[in-house]
């Protein structure tokens, strides 16, 4: 084994893991496992720690490097773990020099002799102001769907969120570099490309001329005609610009699926979260999207059990699923993150949080079942991801067999198995 990456968390981490794999290999690291961690919940941090301990038991002679958002925000905790050999910051992990220094340090200490302080290579993430493009010649995994990082960090400070402290402030990749990478990936045969970032709809505010996400999307579709499918990951509805709405309405190569950062259906909770939209804003935005693209599928992040949330407030989040006609829910049981304002607010009991999360998930399952039933009889263009599964334009999973991964096939939907469409 040379270098293995274990990825937790978001799509952005998935992209960055590909970059890290390349840079670590080029630096000459061998017999090394890299944990690319997530800090969005306490559970995510705990999963990373459990994985580290398990991997060390299974591979006692391998080096373990921890990076990602949890490593950035809790470097000392990971450095204190006997199983860990190096902790790399979130900006450092994307730099070739950091991996070269790691290899030199490992070569100089073959007996795993670092103390906790020597393990840490974590810079001040808030001091990072620019974002270099990371061009990938191709993904190691060879997946039909690949990610392109166009933005990182977040300039907002939602009261529940630790991510700005792990990622820094918002910064963007210049449009020309993004178009270049999309073209290279499309020419390499990747059928679908997903634009990803931490706060994707803030794209471009830090660049000369302040281009928007919609303008970037138009440039990609105009200048990369060979690209079959373009998808956008999570967006903040209040930041969506007119150009992006135009593309949603007019270009079929932009997939009819958006995931929205809604978080709650109650106005007072939204204010306490320091969100910038109201419930009315969310409902009107979803209605606008359906006028522009009637078949669009929408997903959303919703937090269950935010501090001070009452039963009535939670019920408004449940109701929002139907009012916005959401298909995919990402449910987050509220988890207090150290140093965030919400962690100092009056907390909801753990059993209540778990019960509300369970009810939200059940609501999400019912919403997905509704979409699955409505798809029967339709012909969808399915991107074949593997020998057993593909996804429609709307990101609905489809059970397949005998298809070639990477192909886009027009398939008639005949039924569903409760979780996936069948053909």
Image: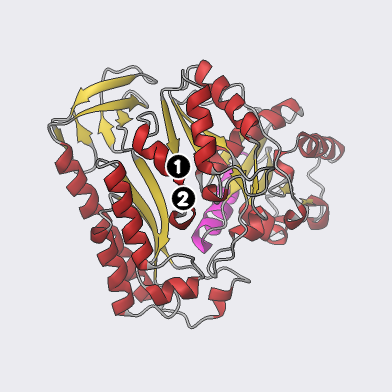
Residue at numbered disc 2: 240
Relative to 205, residue 386 above or below: above
In the rendered image, residue 346, in percent from the top left (x then y), is placed at 48, 83
Query: Magenta stretch?
Result: 41-59
Report which quarter residue 310 is drawn in.
bottom left
Label 2 Cα crowd, 10 Å radius (few <14 / some 14-19 / many 20+): some
Residue at x 52%, y 56% (from the top left corner): 44
Residue 258 shown left or right of residue 50 in the figure: left
Q: What is the secondary structure assignment of the residue under circle 2? A: loop
The quarter of the picture where the N terminus appears is top right
Tally of numbered tags? 2
Report which quarter residue 363 is drawn in.
bottom left
The quarter of the picture where the C terminus appears is top left
User: Any magenta on residue 82?
Assistant: no
Report which quarter residue 168 is drawn in.
bottom right
Looking at the rendered structure, which numbered label has been put on residue 244? 1
| 1 and 2 marks in contact (CB < 8 Å) | yes
In the rendered image, residue 221, in percent from the top left (x then y), is placed at 47, 27
In the rendered image, residue 72, in percent from the top left (x then y), is placed at 68, 55
Relative to 275, residue 346 above or below: below
Label 1 Cα crowd, 10 Å radius (few <14 / some 14-19 / many 20+): some
In whole angstroms, how far apart are the C-alphas of marks 1 and 2? 7 Å
In this rendered view, identify the residue nearer to me: 139 or 58. Answer: 139
In the rendered image, residue 162, in percent from the top left (x then y), is placed at 59, 62
In this rendered view, identify the residue nearer to me: 215 or 200. Answer: 215
């Amino acid at each position: 084994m040379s270098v293995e990456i274990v990825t937790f968390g978001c799509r952005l981490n998935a992209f960055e893991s590909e970059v890290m794999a390349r840079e670590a290999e080029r630096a000459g690291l061998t017999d090394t496992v890299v944990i690319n961690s997530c800090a969005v919940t306490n559970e995510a941090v705990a999963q990373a720690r459990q994985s580290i301990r398990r991997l060390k038991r299974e591979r006692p002679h391998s080096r373990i490097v921890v990076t990602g958002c949890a490593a950035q925000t809790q470097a000392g905790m990971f450095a204190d773990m006997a199983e860990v050999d190096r902790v790399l910051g979130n900006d450092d992990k994307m730099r070739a020099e950091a991996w070269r220094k790691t290899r030199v340090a490992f070569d100089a200490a073959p007996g795993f002799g670092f103390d906790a302080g020597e393990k840490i290579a974590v810079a001040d993430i808030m001091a990072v102001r620019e974002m270099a493009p990371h061009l990938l010649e191709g993904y190691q995994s060879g997946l039909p769907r690949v990610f392109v990082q166009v933005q990182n960090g977040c300039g907002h400070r939602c009261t529940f969120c630790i991510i700005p402290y792990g990622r820094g402030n918002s910064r963007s990749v210049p449009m020309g570099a993004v178009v270049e990478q999309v073209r290279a990936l499309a020419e390499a045969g990747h059928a679908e490309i997903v634009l990803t970032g931490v706060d994707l709809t803030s794209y471009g505010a830090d660049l000369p001329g302040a281009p928007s996400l919609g303008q970037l999307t138009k440039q990609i579709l105009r200048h990369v005609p060979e690209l079959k499918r373009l998808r956008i990951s999570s967006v903040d509805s209040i930041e969506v610009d007119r150009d992006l709405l135009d593309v949603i309405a007019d270009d079929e190569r932009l997939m009819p699926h958006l995931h929205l950062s809604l978080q709650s259906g109650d106005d007072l909770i939204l204010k306490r979260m320091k969100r910038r939209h109201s419930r009315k804003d969310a409902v009107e935005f979803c209605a606008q999207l359906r006028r522009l693209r009637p078949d669009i599928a929408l997903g959303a992040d919703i937090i269950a059990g935010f501090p001070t949330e009452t039963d009535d407030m939670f019920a408004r989040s449940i109701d929002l699923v139907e009012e916005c006609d959401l298909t995919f829910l990402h449910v987050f049981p509220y988890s207090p993150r150290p140093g965030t304002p919400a962690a100092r607010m009056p907390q909801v009991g753990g059993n209540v949080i778990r019960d509300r999360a369970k009810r939200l998930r059940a609501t999400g399952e019912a919403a997905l079942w509704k979409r699955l039933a409505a798809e029967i009889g339709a012909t969808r263009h399915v991107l074949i991801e593997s020998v057993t599964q593909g996804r429609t334009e709307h990101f609905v999973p489809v059970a397949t067999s005998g298809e070639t991964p990477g192909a886009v096939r027009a398939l008639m939907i005949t039924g569903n198995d409760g979780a996936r469409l069948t053909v």
